[in-house]
Image (cartoon, helix red, strand yellow):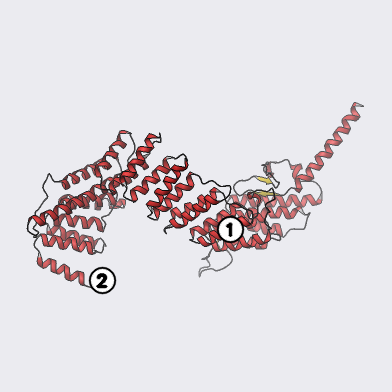
């Protein structure tokens, strides 16, 4: 009895095993675009072992139909291996051989669909390849490159029953390449092919066709191309099909506005307003901060500060990035007091400012003409052992240069009135004047940068030379020009602003010959003098009492193409 019972149990296990084998071959597996895993197409996809690691008897059987499936799957593995090696042409040949094989059971088509998915995904993720069968040059060498997205499009058209996965992959490929028009056309086709999911359905947006991810890719592509009318209409179409945009959707679009070369602050505010009204969506801190960045890029610091105050009133917990963005708005809007107030608020709330935060604060003080505050902030950074980068140092050097130019103009106006409306060359400025103090501070910063190993770029030297020009320190200005030329191998070359500032320094000191040499050197470096440059040299000639040279420069300015 026990032996008979054991035999019956063994037969039952074999029957279950056979059923499982058939079911395994009937599942619809598709290849994931970022790994070698295969997923079972179910309501809730779960990861299973790669087919090449699975038990052979689960994949193949001795029946003739299953032998065909086994051959097809081996070809699929071959395609995958070729793509792993970057051999697109070989994978395409294998795919063509797979489709040209003998007919088998119905799930042979499913294997072919998985192969199509694999190759289409690879093409959409790739770049360009040489066209092996079309236009060739005189020497027989291929001269035509083909975008792999076009190959993916051809594969999509050649599929007997194009799947939603194949459509969505091609649409995302077009979107990533910035081909928003092609992406939109394909999107219309897939929308017509697959009916929208009703609101009473239990499926999520990720299971809708097209999926939310595909819509987001097309939205971002349209936004990057400045097609905001299409963005608005596409958002409306999504809602009608029951695919609701989420906060990530709006954050992605706002990020495009913040990085766009064009000013997109109006579009950013419109998107922010839509996000606030969208049912089931609460804009997060990233949403508001990105909208602030878009306003700052559009030179609407006032709008950025308004958003910042709204966020504070809403009670959202702020982070260092949001605070720094608000301070950047203050720096661009010359609101240095507000910037320092925000910095104090950060510290009071226990949010530690970072190097970028202090750099923005230094820039705010510099733009506001508060160079003393800017240098104080640099000292605070040193006390906290913060690394001061080139941008932060440049903000401080620029603050000193602006203050020096302002002080120099005021001093020259005063001298003009004191001398009865007549201007005379006075040589070097008095050693105890405010402008010379600024010049000394500037050189100290340059020395600090050199000792700390911080790169001094063209902006650094140009601002420092501008301070020398205001102070009339022509020898120091010439030295800095020569230093820039010596560092030319690092991409640091005197620009028009640096030359003009050095010419101004020579002019304020009554040094005509050095000023004229700088002017000619500027031309030799391929820099065309502008009106400011001519005015600086003419001013130097007037100061040095060179009337003939001045009239010659005037005639030169009046000549065409000058």
Of residues 91 and 470, the one drawn nearer to the viewer in this rendering = 470
Secondary structure beneath dot 2 equals loop
Is 78 left, or right, of 227 in this rendering? right
Instruction: Look at the numbered disc 1 and give the secondary structure of its residue.
Output: helix
Q: Residue at x 19, y 55 (%)?
A: 502
Label drawn at residue 561: 2
> How far across and down, in percent of the image, does residue 512 sit?
12, 59
Residue 319 relative to residue 560: left or right: right
| Marks 1 and 2 in Cβ contact (< 8 Å) | no
Q: Earlier in the sequence, mark 1 or mark 2?
A: 1
User: For the point 17% across and 48% down, which residue is it?
Assistant: 435
Q: Residue at x 22, y 49 (%)?
A: 403
Q: Which dot marks residue 236?
A: 1
**Labels in figure, total:** 2
Residue 380 falls in which quadrant of the image? top left
Residue at the image position 77 percent from the left and 50 percent from the top: 67
Tell me which corner region of the image, top left, top right, bottom left or bottom right, holds residue 418: bottom left
Q: Position of residue 12 (x, y in %)?
A: 85, 36
Residue 519: mark:
none
Residue 137 vs 107, above or below: the answer is below
- Crowd class of label 1 (few under 14; some 14 to 19; many from 20; radius 10 Å): some
Q: Is residue 434 left or right of residue 188?
A: left
Image quadrant holding the C terminus, namely bottom left
Residue 155: x %, y % from top left: 64, 60
Give the CA separation, mark 1 to mark 2.
Answer: 54 Å
Q: Is residue 478 visible?
A: no
**Between marks 1 and 2 in the image, the one whose residue lies nearer the viewer:** 1
In this view, the residue farthest toward the front is 313
Which residue extends farthest right? 1
Q: Does residue 63 lie above or below 376 as drawn?
A: below
Please tell me how crowded label 2 is: few (under 14), some (14-19), or many (20+) other residues with Cα within 10 Å. Answer: few
The quadrant of the rendering that contains the N terminus is top right
């Amino acid at each position: 009895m026990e032996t008979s019972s054991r035999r019956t149990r063994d037969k039952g296990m074999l029957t279950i095993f056979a059923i499982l084998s058939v079911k395994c071959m009937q599942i619809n597996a598709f290849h994931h675009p970022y790994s070698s895993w295969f997923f079972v197409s179910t309501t809730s996809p779960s990861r299973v072992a790669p087919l090449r690691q699975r038990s052979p008897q689960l994949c193949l059987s001795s029946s003739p139909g299953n032998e065909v499936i086994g051959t097809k799957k081996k070809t699929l593995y071959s395609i995958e291996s070729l793509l792993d090696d970057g051999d697109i042409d070989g994978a395409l040949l294998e795919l063509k051989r797979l489709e040209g094989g003998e007919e088998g059971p119905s799930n042979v088509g499913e294997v072919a669909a998985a192969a199509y998915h694999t190759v289409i995904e690879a093409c959409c993720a790739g770049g360009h390849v040489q066209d092996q069968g079309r236009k060739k040059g005189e020497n027989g060498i291929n001269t035509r490159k083909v975008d792999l997205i076009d190959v993916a499009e051809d594969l999509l058209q050649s599929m007997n029953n194009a799947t939603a996965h194949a459509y969505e992959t091609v649409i995302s490929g077009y979107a990533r390449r910035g081909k928003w028009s092609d992406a939109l056309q394909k999107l219309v086709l897939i929308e017509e092919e697959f009916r929208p999911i009703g609101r009473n359905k239990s499926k999520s947006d990720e299971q809708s066709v097209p999926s939310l991810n595909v819509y987001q890719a097309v939205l971002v592509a349209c936004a990057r191309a400045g097609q905001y009318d299409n963005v608005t209409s596409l958002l409306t179409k999504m809602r009608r099909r029951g695919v609701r945009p989420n906060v990530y959707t709006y954050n992605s679009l706002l990020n495009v506005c913040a990085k766009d070369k064009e000013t997109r602050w109006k579009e950013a505010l419109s998107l922010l307003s839509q996000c606030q009204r969208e049912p089931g969506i609460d804009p997060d801190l990233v949403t508001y901060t990105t909208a602030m960045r878009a306003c700052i890029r559009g030179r609407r610091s006032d709008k950025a500060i308004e958003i910042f105050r709204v966020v504070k009133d809403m009670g959202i917990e702020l982070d260092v990035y949001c605070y720094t963005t608000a301070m950047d708005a203050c720096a661009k809007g010359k609101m240095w007091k507000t910037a320092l107030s925000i910095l104090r608020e950060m510290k009071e709330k226990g949010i530690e400012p970072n190097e970028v935060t202090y750099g923005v604060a230094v820039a705010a003080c510099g733009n506001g003409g508060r160079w003393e505050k800017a240098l104080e902030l640099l000292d605070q950074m040193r006390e906290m052992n913060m690394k001061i980068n080139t941008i932060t140092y440049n903000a401080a050097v620029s603050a000193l240069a602006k203050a020096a130019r302002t002080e120099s103009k005021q001093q020259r106006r005063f001298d003009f009135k004191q001398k009865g409306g007549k201007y005379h060359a006075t040589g070097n400025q008095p050693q105890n004047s405010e402008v010379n103090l600024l010049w000394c501070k500037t050189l100290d910063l340059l020395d600090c940068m050199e000792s700390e190993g911080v790169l001094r770029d063209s902006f650094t030297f140009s601002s420092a030379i501008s301070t020398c020009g205001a102070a009339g320190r022509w020898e120091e200005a010439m030295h800095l020009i020569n230093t820039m030329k010596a560092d030319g191998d690092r991409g640091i070359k005197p620009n028009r602003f640096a030359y003009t500032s050095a010419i101004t320094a020579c002019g304020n000191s009554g040094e005509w010959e050095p000023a004229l040499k700088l002017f000619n050197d500027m031309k030799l470096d391929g820099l065309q003098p502008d009106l400011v440059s001519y005015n600086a040299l003419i001013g130097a000639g007037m100061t040095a009492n060179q009337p003939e040279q001045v009239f010659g420069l005037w005639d030169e300015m009046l000549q065409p193409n000058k």
